[in-house]
Amino acid sequence: MPAELLRGKKRLGVRMIPTEEASARRREIEEKLKQEEETLSFIRDSLEKSDQLTKNMVSILSSFESRLMKLENSIIPVHKQTENLQRLQENVEKTLFCLDHVISYYHVAKDTEKIIREGPTGRLEEYLACMAKIQKAVEYFQDNNPDSPELNRVKLLFEKGKESLESEFRSLMARHSKPVPPILILDLITLDDELESQEDVTLEHLPESVLQDIVRISGWLVEYGRNQDFMNVYYQIRSSQLDRSIKGLKEHFRKNSSSSGVPYSPAIQNKRKDTPTKKPIKRPVLIPGTIRKAQNLLKQYSQQCLDGKKGASNLIPMEGHEHDLRVKHLSDTLSDKHGPAAGRDDMLDMEIDAYIHCVSAFIKLAQSEYQLLTEIIPEHHQKKTFDSLIQESLENLMIEGDNIVSAARKAIIRHDYSAVLTIFPILRHLKQTKPEFDQVLQGTAASTKNKLPSLITSMETTGAKALEDFADNIKNNPDKEYNMPKDGTVHELTSNAILFLQQLLDFQETAGAMLASQETSSSASSYSSEFSRRLLSTYICKVLGNLQLNLLSKSKVYEESLSAIFLLNNYNYILKSLEKSELIQLVAVTQKNAEKSYREHIEQQITAYQRSWLKVTDSFLDRNLPVVQPGVKLKDKERQAIKDRFKGFNDCLEELCKIQKAWAIPDTEQRDKIRKTQKNIVLETYSALLSRYGNVPFTKNPEKYIKYRVEQVGEMIEKLFDTSA
């Protein structure tokens, strides 16, 4: 083995092996070398082929590049020429289009003049499309050719079209705006909760198709017309219809108002039949029927005070049913004797009822008008337009309310306090509806918002003045000799005062607010229902106190016993009236012992009355009466004393029974009580006198002095206070 090979193997780290193994190993290595050489040869051949292919590919690409360059050099000039031609073509097309577009503006006036001249009626969409073309033509000529005669032509056409649209707006509004029927208004303001939850009564002021046209015209006039005149047209027409609707409702009341109420539409009546209702129908607060009776009685009394001498009163208040019949008879008598006055009272009731309904109608109609307005008028003009729209109707309501206040003030000057009773239901309704009023008038001018509060304040001031004047009149009523009941029954002043106070029960909160409105104390500033109730209680106690003082003064025109009967009847009437109504609870707010006090006054008057019988019972006293001894003959002086006692008893008894039979105690309980007490006292004493001297021969004519049996005396006393006996 060559030395180099051995060295090479050593470098490769080949371990020296024995000779046989070395030979085998060498052969193996030689085979591997041979294979490696073959592989190397194959790789060399492949590289040579690859180099050849690369050269061929480079040659092909070089040739392709050369050809592309030649093609590019020949195509680019053609492409540029084509691109220039295309650009020229586009410019020509654009120029032609612009020419057509410009030329079209010159034809707008001719194309649209006929449609504009004929107006938008029946073809609003087409008309608005023409107006859009004219608007664009105007803008074009203004920007590009302001000196063109075509500009003036399209301008005139545009103005004519705008005027036609304004005229169409006015025509549609005037032609289709109609007053709301009174029956529908009544249904709207008298729905109960259950019906309202199922289906509301809606007002269709304008047909839907007409409304859409009006909205389109309004939108165009705002956007392109630059004109707000149509808003004035809108509020003038709608304001007139609102006012006519309310006046129509008032006229409906004049024709149809009755005790059975105002009829509703058949649809609503059918709904009420088909729908079970759990709550009463919400109607505006109407003037109670008893107020009319109170007005008649108070007017009669105030007229008597104004006329001066009138003689005795024909009003004899009774208790319970008897009293109601007497008051009804008096009311009927007034109606018969004073037909025109009674008719005026009915008319006044109708006017008050109608006014209350008109206030509620205004709220509902104004709400509906605002909903309609929001669809037609731009948002930033809605509040102002609505303010103008409702002015006429609202002003008429306020003027009518002021007239009621003025009439009440004049009546109060005449001491006709029935007028204040007309204010109560109206004032209560105004205060109840004030939150809705405030909501409806939200966003209007301050002068508009302040109209209702001013009317409420005026009514409260007038009402408070009437209440105070009434209390003062009760105290200072000068009627002492005239119009005094000859039988000592309840005075007309008492009956009227109680009747007036009873009317306040239905308006406690309103009356209390009237009185509170005049308070300047710090407590008034923190107004509450309890404070109002205390003020009303104080006022009622004041009236009752003034009435008591006046009755005491009036009672002095009678002799002592009839004065006691007069005060007894009046005190008893006051007490029973307080107990039968809620007045006693109101009085108790500030005077806990009022009932007890009146009972004590009644007992005092009973005691004072009983003193009138002392001259009868004094006849039986043992003072100076002879002592009768069996078998002893009476002296002439003794016989005369007995005769005088019996004669005095007979004369006093007859005189008292004759006089007091014409007196009256309407209260059956009190009448029976007084009769029984007097009968027991008189009969007990008379029986003792008869048993003592009945069989004594003090006279030859005993029937002349012993005229009555005990039973007869009792029967005579039973006929006291009975004019029919």
Image (cartoon, rainbow, N blue to C red):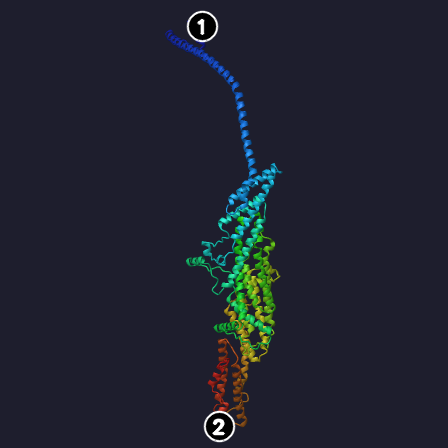
Q: Badges 1 and 2: C-beta atoms under 8 Å apart?
A: no
> Along the polypeptide, which appears first: circle 1 or circle 2?
1
In this orientation, does residue 409 appear? yes
Residue 599: x percent and y percent?
53, 73
Q: Position of residue 463 (x, y in %)?
A: 58, 64
Residue corresponding to mark 1: 4
Q: Vertically, is 611 above or below 459?
A: below
* Residue 584 appears anywhere in the view: no
Q: Dot 2, crowdedness within 10 Å: few (<14), some or many (≥20)?
A: few
Q: Locate residue 104: give its quadrant.
A: top right
Q: Label 1 neighbourhood size at 10 Å, few (<14), some (14-19), many (20+)?
A: few
Q: Identify which residue, 687 or 349, lies in the foreground.
A: 349
- Helix, strand or loop at label 2? It is loop
Is 506 above or below relative to 657?
Answer: above
Front in this rendered view, residue 492 or 700? 492
Assign the N terminus to one quadrant of the image: top left
**In the visual, does 236 lie left or right of 710?**
right
Give the residue number, with chain letter if any, for mark 2. Answer: 631
Which residue is at the far top?
A: 2
Tell me residue 633's x, y (percent): 50, 95
Q: Amino acid at mark 1?
A: Glu
